[in-house]
Image (cartoon, grey):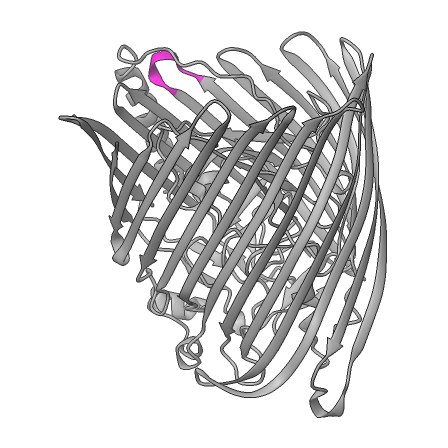
Amino acid sequence: MKTHKLLSLSALLFLQTNLFAIQLDTLNLDEVMLKSALINQANPALTVSEISYDEYGIRAVNFQDAIDFSAGLWITNSENQAQDNRMVIRGFGARSAFGIRGLKIILDGVPLTTPDGQSQVDNIPFQLIENVEIMKSLSSTRYGNASGGVVIINTFSNLADKYIVEAGYGSYGYKNIKGTYSTNSEKSSTILNISKVESNGYRDHSSYLNKSLFFKHSRKLQNMNLKFNLLYFDSPYAFDPGGLNIESVEENRSQARDRNILYNSQESIKQIQTGVVLDWDTKLGEVKSNVYYSNRDFVGLLPFTNGGYVELNRDFSGAEISIKDKFQNFEWIVGTSIQDQKDYRRRFENNEGEKGAITLDQIESFSSYGAFALASYNKENYSIQSGVRFDLHEISLDDNVGIDQQYVEYSKSLKAFSPNVGFIYNLNKKDEVYINYGKSYETPSLSELSANPNGVGFNGDLNPMNSSGFDLGFRNKSQNLSYSITAFYINTKDEIVRYELEGFEGMNFYRNLGTSKRIGTEIEVSYNLGNSGVLNASYTQAKYEFKNQEVSGDLPGIPKSNFALEWLYGYKDFDLKLDLKYVNSLYADNNNEVKVPSHLLSNIALKNKFNLKGFFLEVGLHVRNLLDEKYYDNIRTNAFGNRFYEPASLRSFILSIKTTF
C-alpha cells in the first residue's frame, strides 16, 4: 500500500511539472561558497551538504522542517517540546532522548554546543535561516569534542522589507505571532525578531508556550567586520506526554502516559545567549575570532518520586581565535579555543507534581582547551589537505550537601589527539572525486555522567567513545544539475547508549556498548527543471552495527535507509513546495527484538502575495502529513516496559497571514 502511495504521489508531482512548464521564468542554481570559518580550502575534501533559502520563498514551520533534507542526516521529535529535537548524522546522536548529543551546532559563527557536547535548538530563529551547511565527515580536527557531524547555520543579515508582521493558526490550537524589524545601510545592518508560539499539542498533556527574541547587528569597520548576536528564549511550560507501549498506542494514540499526568511531567526554560564575532585582515593573514556567553535556567518534572524534580542552572562561555593565509600553492590556518561550562544541578522528590525534599545538590564543571592547525597544497587539478588538533578537558564535581553523609568530589582530565588527511582530484571543470580520513571523539555529557545508577556523584564507569573513518565521494556541478555520491566507513569504540531502570521510568541512564561500525552510501541530487521549478532528492542506505562481547546487532533508533523528494515551484507571486519522505524500519532496543515499521510522510505548502493599495498581504497554507500516515515522532530507545513510542500527529493544517511595509 505504501509503495502505491509513493508511486502515485511521484506521478502527480511530475504531472504538475509538465502542466506548469510553460509558465515559469528560468531558475539558476548558484555555486555554493562554504562559510565555515574552520574550512581553509575553497573546495574541501569533506562531505558537506548545503541548504539555501530565499527571502521570499516558503519558510519552514519548525527547525526539523528547515534542515532535514540532507542525506545522512535524520531528525525527529519536533512535536514533544519538552524533549526538543533529536538529530542524527551517520548514527551520531542516536542515543539522545532529548536535545542533541555528539554533534556540533554553530549559529552565525557562535557555538551553541557546550564543551561536554550538549546542544539545544529550541531558541534558533529557524524562519530567518539563510543557509545551512551540514558537515558529515568526522570533524574533531576542526571542532574538538562531539564532532561526529557539524551543522553550521547562518541567518539573514538584512531583509528587503523593513517591517514584517506574521500570524499563523492551525490544528491542535496552534498559534504563532511574530514581528520582524530590519534596516541596513552601506556599513551596517540590523535585524530584530520577536515571536510567540503556543499549541495544545496532538497528544494529551503536550501543550507548550514559547516566547523568543533574536537580535543581530553587523557593522563594517576599517579592515574589520563585526557581528553581534543576542538570543532570548522563554518557555514557561512544555508538558511531556511520555512514551507508550504498543498496546496503549493501539488503544488511543493521542493519550499520554498515566504516570506523566500523575507527576505532571514538564519542563520550563529561560535562556539567554550572546556572542560577538570579529574578523579582520592583518599582515599575517585573515583573523577570525569570537567570544560568547550563555545562561540556561531549567526546571524539569520527571514521572517518578526520588529525584524527579530537577533544577539546573547552566553557565556556558568561550572564545576562539584563528588566522589563515595562503602562500603560492599553500593554504594554512592555525587557531586555539577555550570553553567553560558549569552546571549547578539539584534534584528533589517529585511528590506528584509538588517539589519535595532535596536528594542531590552538586556543581558540575567541564572546561576545554584546544589548539589546531590545518594546511593544504593546491594545484590546478588536485589538492592535498591535512590537519591536527589537540584538546584537553577538565571535568569536576563538587557535592554541596552530602546526601546520606556521602560527600563526593570528582575530577578527571581527558586528552585527545585528532588528525585528518584528505585528497581531492578534479576530473574536469564539473566532476571531482575526493577521499578523506579523520577521527572524532565524544566524551559523556555532564547530564549523562550525573545520571549515576549507583547513586550520588558521577558514573565513573562511563567512558568517552572514539571513532575513525573514511569518506570516498564523487561530486558533479553544472548549471542545471548537481549531484554527489558518497560512501563512508566509520569504526567506533565504546559506543554510548541509553537505557532505563525499573522505578526510574522516564529517567535515562547511559553505558558503553563495545564497538560499532557504520557503513553507508549517501546520494544527493538537485535538478533545475527550467520553467517548472527545482527538484531535489536525497537517499541514504546504511548499516549501523555493534558488537558487545559475544552479542551483535544493529544500533537502535536509526533507520537503515531513508529517501526524500522535494519540488519547489514559483510563478510571479505564487510559490509551492511539495515534499515526500520515506523512512525505513528501525529497532527500538539493543536486543533488536522490537522493530518500528517504516513510514511515508508528505507535506505541502503554498502561498500567494497580494498587492492591496500600498501594502502587501501574503496568505499561506501548510498541510502537514498530507497522506494522514500513522507514524512515530520519536522512539525512546531501550525504554523500560517497552514504552518506546511517541505517536506523531495525523494530518494537520496551518494557515498563515503576513504583511510587509
The answer to whether residue 534 is above or below residue 311 is: above
Q: Residue at x 39, y 44 (%)?
A: 193
Q: Which quadrant of the rendered structure holds the C terminus?
A: top left
Q: Position of residue 156 (x, y in %)?
A: 46, 33
Left or right placement of residue 424 versus residue 106 in this view: right
Q: Which quadrant of the rendered structure holds the N terminus?
A: top left
Residue 419 visible (yes or no): no
Q: Residue at x 77, y 66 (%)?
A: 462
Left or right placement of residue 538 versus residue 508 in this view: left
Residue 60 visible (yes or no): yes
**Residue 555 on the magenta segment:** no
The answer to whether residue 644 is above or below residue 553 is: below
Q: Position of residue 284 (x, y in %)?
A: 81, 24
Q: Position of residue 312 (x, y in %)?
A: 58, 70
Closer to the camera, 216 or 310? Answer: 216
Q: Residue at x 52, y 81 (%)?
A: 304
The answer to whether residue 592 is above or below residue 568 is: below
Which residue range is magenta in the image?
528-533
**Residue 531 on the magenta segment:** yes
Q: Residue at x 69, y 50 (%)?
A: 318
Closer to the camera, 78 or 409? Answer: 409
Residue furthest bottom as drawn? 404
